[in-house]
Structures are given as C-alpha cells and as structure tokens.
C-alpha cells in the first residue's frame, strides 16, 4: 500500500510548524512560511477569511509532471513520492506547464538551477519514518499514513461534521487521485483550492498525442531533409548552368 497525507484544514491552527520542519529537513534557506511557494519553500500555510490551508506537491497517482518530462527526471515511486533527478533534468520546465496545481519552482538565480518541490520526505520514508511536516504538526491537522486508511478517516470526518466541511475529499479521484488528501471548508474550496474537475488522469488525456510524437518527428525530419536536398540540387543545377553559359561565352 502507498503512503499518503491527510490535511484537515478545520484542525489547522496556522502555526507554520510544517513549513519550518520542512525547511530544516531539506536544508532550505527560504524565509519562514512565505505567502507562496518558491525554490526554498516546499510548503506554505495560506490564510483565507480566517481559514487555513496548506499548499504543497500533491504527489499525484499518475503525475502530469512526470508524463511531460522528456528525459524522465520526474517519476512516481510505488511508495507514493514523486521524485526528481537533477542529473537528468535539462531545464525545459515542461513540468511547470503540465502541473495542474502550479507547484514546481525553479532556481532562477542559480548558475546550476534545478526544479524544486516537496519530495514527500522520500528519504525519511525509506527509514520507515513519517514526513517532517506530519511529525511537527501539534494539532494533527497533517497526518501521515497509508493512503487507503487516510481516505476512510477523511470520509468519517466529513460525515461527523457535515456543517463544517465541503462534502468532498480532494485528492481521492480528481485528476486520477493523489497521495495528498485534503478536507476543508467551502470558503477554501471557493477561494484558494486548485484541483482538476475531472477524474481522468491527466497523462491519459495526452497519451494519444505523446504516442504520435516519434512519427511526427520522423515525418518532419524527412520533409526537412527533402527540402534540403531539393535546395541543394537547385543550387548545383544553377551553378552548372552558369558554368556552361560562361564556357559558351568564352568560346565565342
């Protein structure tokens, strides 16, 4: 079974401990809990009309970022994390466009820039530990565990407090589902929460187009080679005709 995180915005007290713990665990130099994600902050707590919600990588079950990467620098692991390999990355930033949550950030000021985002504390998970943000949460608004068990808990909370929650576990099915599950208020859903409105995994929607890329590339390459050959041949014929005219003129 894969791991997941359940974030319950009703329990969040906005302390920012999750952001600080993430910075310490990943040796980030960004300021504590800024207003938005950046290359040195992988999670932030946003406040909307008195309500709080975390923003961080959702670790999609079928991630669009990994599907769009032409060199396999991003991939989904069986345990849950969507991880990044800087040694493979070519800096194309297609993942920025593909991500429906607008998560990845780039080290614009670095001479060797990388794509940056939450890695779901993949190294801590390998040691059998919970994520840094879950460990640091004093109110249990962020809970780490098996995704299926967290789904059951999320639905139980929705049923117990229907007057408070929007009636949906975000991340259960949207865009194919994600390892991060969120339950929150209608205010947050209306003003601050970004989620796909379809259940189909986004990579499945583009698979047909991706499968045609090699054929299109071959066809375009063949066409360009043909244009080059015709242009080259035309120039050779023109040069030969000019030479013949010159010989004819010299003979007179």
Image (cartoon, rainbow, N blue to C red):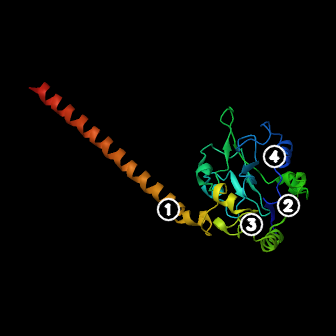
Mark 4: few/some/many CA within 10 Å (<14, 14-19, 20+): many
Q: Judge left or right: residue 45 versus residue 247.
A: right
Which mark is in front, 4 or 3? 3
Mark 3: few/some/many CA within 10 Å (<14, 14-19, 20+): many
Q: Judge left or right: residue 232 versus residue 198.
A: left
Q: Position of residue 212 (x, y in %)?
A: 50, 62
Foreground pick, 62 / 223: 62
- Circle 1 SS class: helix
Which mark is in front, 4 or 1? 4
Q: Position of residue 146 (x, y in %)?
A: 84, 67
**Residue bearing mark 2:** 143
Q: Position of residue 48 (x, y in %)?
A: 71, 51
Against 162, residue 13 (above or below) is above
**Between disc 3 and disc 1, whose residue precedes?**
3
- Circle 2 SS class: strand
Which mark is in front, 2 or 3? 3
**Between disc 2 and disc 1, whose residue precedes?**
2
- Circle 4 SS class: helix
**Between disc 4 and disc 3, whose residue precedes?**
4
**Alpha-carbon distance for marks 2 and 3?**
17 Å
**Residue bearing mark 1:** 212
**Residue bearing mark 3:** 165
**Alpha-carbon distance for marks 4 and 3?**
24 Å
**Residue bearing mark 4:** 19
**Alpha-carbon distance for marks 2 and 1?**
42 Å
**Alpha-carbon distance for marks 3 and 1?**
44 Å
């Amino acid at each position: 079974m894969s791991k997941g995180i359940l974030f319950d915005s009703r329990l969040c007290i906005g302390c920012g401990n999750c952001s600080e713990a993430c910075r310490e665990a990943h040796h980030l130099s960004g300021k504590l809990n800024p207003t938005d994600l950046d290359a040195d902050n992988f999670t932030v707590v946003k406040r909307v009309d008195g309500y709080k919600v975390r923003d961080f990588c959702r670790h999609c079950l079928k991630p669009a970022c990994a599907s769009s990467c032409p060199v396999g620098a991003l991939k989904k692991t069986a345990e849950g994390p969507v991880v990044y390999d800087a040694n493979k990355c070519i800096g194309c930033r297609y993942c920025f466009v593909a991500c429906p949550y607008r998560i990845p950030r780039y080290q614009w000021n670095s001479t060797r820039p990388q794509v940056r985002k939450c890695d779901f504390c993949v190294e801590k998970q390998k040691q059998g530990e919970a994520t840094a943000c879950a460990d640091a949460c004093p109110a249990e608004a962020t809970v780490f565990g098996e995704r299926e068990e967290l789904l059951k808990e999320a639905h139980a909370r929705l049923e117990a407090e229907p007057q408070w929650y929007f009636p949906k576990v975000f991340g259960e099915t949207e865009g194919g589902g994600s390892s991060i599950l969120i339950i929150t208020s209608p205010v947050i859903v209306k003003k601050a929460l970004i989620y796909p409105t379809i259940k189909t995994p986004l990579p499945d929607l583009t698979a047909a187009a991706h499968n045609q890329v090699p054929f299109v590339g071959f066809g375009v390459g063949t066409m360009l080679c043909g244009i080059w050959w015709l242009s080259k041949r035309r120039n050779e014929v023109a040069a030969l005709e000019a030479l013949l005219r010159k010989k004819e003129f010299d003979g007179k």
